[in-house]
Image (cartoon, rainbow, N blue to C red):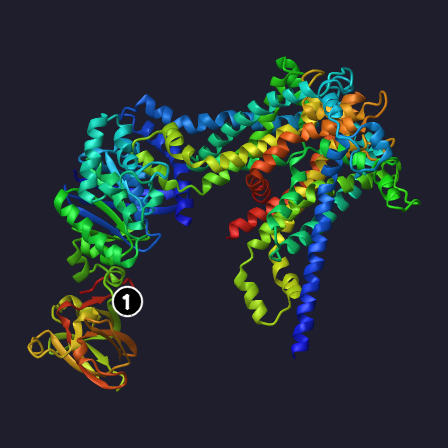
């Protein structure tokens, strides 16, 4: 009897160890690229050639970071990715704020002030979340040209607002659906109008969904490449486009350390957001996914 | 819940009713401010409605129209019927891209689902430091595909990357040059894409697992079912909706995959790793074949719709039944 | 404070008719209760009075003014919601004074009004808390306070007590009654709880399927129900409905019942008249409330309206003040209310007396009152 208990306990212990071993391997698999990027970015090229992906740097150097930021060649110009990093901020901040705010208003109307056809419109809009953007970029490129917004950050901000709104509206609609409609009724009876109810009653409840939505939009816009590469010109490119140009430009000797430093620079803002607000990030991903 | 729905419907219907009422009973004067209040919700939504109709539906139609023309470097409207589509189907590069999306999409979705389920189940075993592990699995999702591509391009570098690492471990004969092998390069895309997205699928499944009523599991345990049995017979069937949404999202990512190819392989070697998205971009913007590019974009839309419409249909039907 | 007049109000959602022509009117200061099962249209009617939903046809007058097309804010009403609908981001003070603030009442007056209402409802100590920091009962009070903070023409209560536990519900019920007696306000109150309806109302409108089944004082509704639905809905335990045959013996109309021991009894009707002629020998439904079938009370048993019979006790359920005894008449279960001291155990014979003065008869097909 006690024998069988012993073997049973042993079996449990063995399977626990196996479990943690598998998880550890998985953790390594997911962490490896980040570790490699970091290690490579602080090595010299000689060090890179002498060692391997995960060999410890002989000397920690920030040269590659400096070069990536200020003097690496991204296509035609050789001024590093620094200015493009700021471009990305210039594009991302207004695009995120405006699309989020519009999404909040839309969600408010679509849940608390429904009218005939509003549900159908929401369905139409939802569909917009799913189309491959390839199917709209050509007409958009022409429109931006007519509006004089081609190759400008303003143009990119506009594009991101237009195609981000379906998602932000979805987020807010799904959140506001769970806000009791009686609150709005009560405020109507108290004499409040459309905007008063929004400002005084609805917005103060919306902090969590604002965080989720802003984080989601921030990562989406920051990480965008397609719109960036199609709609921006030489000096208005976002960082993703600049990084791709830097890595895939075939001139001169490949400097992997600079590539990795530039990649880290491009990744930092979203990584920081993820580390600081990971909980909301995951919530945004799953909410947008499961309900979308 | 039900009363909420009806009152919403009522509110939806009422706006019109009121306007009709007040015009019929014209004797009662309507305060202009009230009139504005009544129209405000529609006014507020109007810009979005216009943008959606114009920039999504209008543009889709526009692209559809362009796909029927001879447009080259600049759009023109000399209609040639479905000639661009015929040309597309005859195009070697498009065939490669189509085949690639099948290989890439199929493997990517399958492996992501597999890793996602397995990791979610493993993480659901009351693991110590579960939070940190989850964080590690998910962080790639915060990165741009361009960053992912750049990183993996370096890791898979035939000379200095993984190959050298294994050599340094002592396996001198190890060879790993998929990145430059036209037959194998497509699988490097799968590796990088799986690395980026599988953690997300894991998070979806984990959320699903946490949503399973624990009393059902307890009841099954009392009935004498073993844990693998419980997972197979009770929990996984419960996760069917999660499978579906994960499938939809993953196929969506696969079809839109553009950045990753651009960063990791640039479509090469040659055009061995072209996908429809990169084909469309190159054809339209680099090669000046707008008509052909539009046709390929419409094909992509068609595939997305073919996957999406049945899904949405079953979703909506399911909701109506509830 | 004002009168309320609802005339031929109809409401459709598409093809579904939710209100099928409602006519109600109450006087200044009256307490009207709309009661009925869920889906009967009472909440829709309430929302129509509030202006939260628009009616398809018909008119609503508050204090003599036609408010039919007006926005809620222009109707001069206040409402207490089932979920209380307290603004989560505002303090209790903010909640109570919000409507005054919107209406641009000067700050000094607002504060005075908040103090007055808080005093009235004994929530002064809660004024600086957020709704999330309050108990259910406290929230309920704040919701009432919010409505009381103005002096609207009409107060609307939408099932305000249904989210409270049983004990608190009874307490608040009394409190609302006291408040109404003190303030003499016109109140419309929706509930599905017939006890609330009986205890609070000056007038009750019993609703079903978008129609008012009966409109009257609580006692009228209880003693003189218009149809089987009203009779069955009001009162707990519910009125007994007993299918039996109408007979006429020596010019005296009555009903015969058979106990489980095959013993036949004749129950004479008090107010039987010739209008019942055509029903003789036919099946009718006798409606009789449990408290009218009791143990034999010596000083009452000689009254002309009283009949006596003996039946076997099937089940006895003590409730404390009295015991509900289930017996079998005409093969149907009948509830009787007896004094605990007189209660007999299940299976034994017991003698009952039935007071037929308040018995009612229904047409089994139309379910309308015959007598």
In the image, residue C350 sits, relative to residue C185, either above or below, namely: below
Q: Chain of mark 1?
A: C
A176 relative position to A26: left or right: left
Side (left or right) of B240 relative to B4? right
Decide which of B303, A222 is in the foreground and name it.
Answer: A222
| Res. C337 in view | yes
Q: How many marks?
A: 1
**Relative image position of residue C36 (x, y in whole percent):** 29, 54
Quadrant (top left, top right, bottom left, bottom right) of the C terminus of chain C:
bottom left
Q: Quadrant of residue B219?
A: bottom right
Most extreme residue toward the front, as rendered? A59
In percent of width and height, residue B141 lies at: 66, 39
User: Which residue is depicted at the point 32% across and 29% down?
Assistant: B22
Looking at this view, name the residue that lies furthest to the right: B173
Residue C37 point in image, percent of width and height: 32, 56
Q: Which residue is mark 1?
A: C364
| The quarter of the displayed image where residue C122 is located | top left
Tell whether B253 sits left or right of A179: right
Query: For this rendering, which residue is in front, A62 or A203?
Result: A62
């Amino acid at each position: 009897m006690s024998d069988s208990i012993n073997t049973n306990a042993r079996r449990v212990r063995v399977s626990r160890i196996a479990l943690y071993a598998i998880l550890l391997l998985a953790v390594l698999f997911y962490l490896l690229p980040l570790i490699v990027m970091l290690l490579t970015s602080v090595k010299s090229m000689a060090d890179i050639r002498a060692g391997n992906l995960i060999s410890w740097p002989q000397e920690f150097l920030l040269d590659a970071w400096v070069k990536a930021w200020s003097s690496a060649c991204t296509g035609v110009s050789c001024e590093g990715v620094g200015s493009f990093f700021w471009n990305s901020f210039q594009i991302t901040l207004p695009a995120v704020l405006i699309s989020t705010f519009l999404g909040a208003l839309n969600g408010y109307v679509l849940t608390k002030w429904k009218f005939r056809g509003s549900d159908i419109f929401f369905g139409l809009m939802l569909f917009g979340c799913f189309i491959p953007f390839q199917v709209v970029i050509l007409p958009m490129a022409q429109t931006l040209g007519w509006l004089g917004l081609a190759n400008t950050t303003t143009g990119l901000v506009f594009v991101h607002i237009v195609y981000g709104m379906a998602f932000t509206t979805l987020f807010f609609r799904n959140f506001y659906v769970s806000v009791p409609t009686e609150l709005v009724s009560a405020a109507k009876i108290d004499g409040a109008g459309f905007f008063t109810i929004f400002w005084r009653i609805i917005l103060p409840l919306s902090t969590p969904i604002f965080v989720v939505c802003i984080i989601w939009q921030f990562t989406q816009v920051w990480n965008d490449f397609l719109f960036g590469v199609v709609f921006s010109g030489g000096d208005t490119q976002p960082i993703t486009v600049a990084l791709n140009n830097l890595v895939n430009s075939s001139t001169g000797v490949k400097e992997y350390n600079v590539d990795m430093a530039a990649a880290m620079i491009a990744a930092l803002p979203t990584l920081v957001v993820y580390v600081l607000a990971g909980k909301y990030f995951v919530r945004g991903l799953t909410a947008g996914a499961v309900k979308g | 819940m039900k009363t909420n729905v009806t009152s919403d419907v009522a509110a939806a219907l009422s706006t019109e009713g009121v306007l009709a009422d007040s015009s019929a009973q014209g004797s009662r004067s309507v305060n202009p401010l009230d009139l504005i209040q009544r129209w405000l919700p529609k006014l507020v939504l109007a810009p979005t409605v216009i943008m959606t109709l114009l920039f999504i539906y209008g543009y889709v139609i526009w692209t559809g129209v362009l796909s029927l023309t001879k447009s080259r470097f600049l759009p023109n409207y000399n209609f040639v019927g479905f000639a661009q589509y015929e040309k597309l189907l005859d195009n070697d590069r498009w065939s490669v891209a189509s085949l690639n999306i099948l290989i890439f999409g199929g493997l990517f979705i399958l492996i992501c689902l597999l890793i996602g389920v397995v990791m979610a189940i493993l993480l659901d075993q009351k693991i110590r430091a579960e939070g940190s592990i989850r964080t590690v699995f998910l962080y790639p999702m915060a990165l741009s595909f361009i960053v992912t591509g750049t990183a993996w391009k370096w890791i898979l570098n035939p000379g200095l990357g993984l190959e050298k690492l294994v050599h340094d471990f002592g396996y001198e004969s190890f060879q790993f040059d998929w990145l430059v092998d036209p037959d194998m390069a497509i699988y490097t895309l799968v590796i990088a894409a799986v690395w980026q997205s599988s953690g997300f699928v894991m998070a979806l499944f984990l959320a699903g697992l946490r949503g399973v009523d624990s009393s059902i599991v307890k009841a099954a345990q009392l009935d004498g079912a073993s844990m693998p049995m419980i997972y197979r017979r009770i929990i996984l069937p419960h996760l069917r909706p999660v499978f579906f949404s994960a499938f939809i999202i993953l196929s969506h990512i696969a079809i839109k995959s553009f950045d990753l190819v651009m960063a990791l392989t640039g479509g090469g070697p040659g055009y061995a790793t072209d996908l429809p998205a990169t084909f469309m971009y190159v054809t339209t913007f680099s090669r000046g074949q707008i008509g052909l590019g539009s046709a390929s974009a419409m094909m992509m839309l068609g595939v997305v719709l073919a996957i999406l419409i049945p899904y949405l249909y079953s979703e909506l039907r399911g909701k109506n039944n509830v | 404070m004002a009168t309320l007049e609802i005339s031929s109000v109809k409401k459709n959602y598409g093809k579904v008719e939710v209100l099928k022509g409602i006519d109600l009117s109450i006087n200044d200061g009256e307490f009207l209760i709309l009661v009925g099962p869920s889906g009967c249209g009472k909440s829709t009617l309430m929302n129509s009075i509030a202006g939260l939903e628009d009616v398809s046809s018909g008119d609503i007058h508050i204090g003599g003014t036609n408010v039919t097309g007006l926005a809620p804010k222009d109707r001069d009403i206040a409402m207490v919601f089932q979920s209380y609908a307290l603004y989560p981001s505002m303090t209790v003070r903010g909640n109570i004074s919000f409507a005054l603030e919107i209406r641009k009442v000067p700050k000094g007056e607002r504060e005075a009004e908040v103090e007055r209402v808080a005093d009235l409802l004994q929530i002064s100590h809660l004024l600086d808390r957020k709704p999330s920091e309050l108990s259910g009962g406290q929230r309920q009070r704040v919701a009432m306070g919010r409505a009381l903070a103005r002096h609207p023409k009409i107060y609307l209560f939408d099932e305000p007590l249904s989210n409270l536990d049983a004990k608190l519900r009874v307490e608040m019920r009394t409190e609302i009654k006291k408040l109404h007696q003190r303030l003499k306000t016109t109140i419309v109150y929706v509930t599905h709880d017939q006890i609330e309806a009986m205890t609070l109302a000056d007038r009750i409108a019993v609703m079903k399927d978008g129609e008012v089944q009966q409109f009257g004082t609580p006692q009228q509704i209880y003693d003189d129900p218009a149809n089987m639905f009203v009779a069955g809905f009001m009162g707990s335990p519910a009125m007994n409905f007993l299918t039996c045959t109408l007979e006429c013996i020596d010019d005296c109309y009555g009903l015969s019942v058979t106990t489980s021991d095959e013993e036949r009894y004749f129950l004479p009707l008090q107010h039987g008249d010739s209008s019942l002629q055509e029903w003789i020998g036919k099946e009718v439904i006798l409606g009789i409330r449990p408290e009218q079938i009791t143990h034999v009370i010596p000083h009452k048993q000689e009254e002309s309206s009283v009949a006596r019979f003996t039946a076997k006790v099937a089940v006895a359920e003590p409730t404390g003040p009295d015991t509900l005894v289930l017996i079998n008449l005409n093969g149907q279960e009948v509830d009787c209310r007896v004094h605990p001291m007189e209660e007999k155990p299940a299976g034994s014979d017991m003698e009952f007396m039935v007071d037929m003065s308040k018995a009612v008869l229904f047409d089994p097909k139309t379910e309308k009152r015959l007598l």
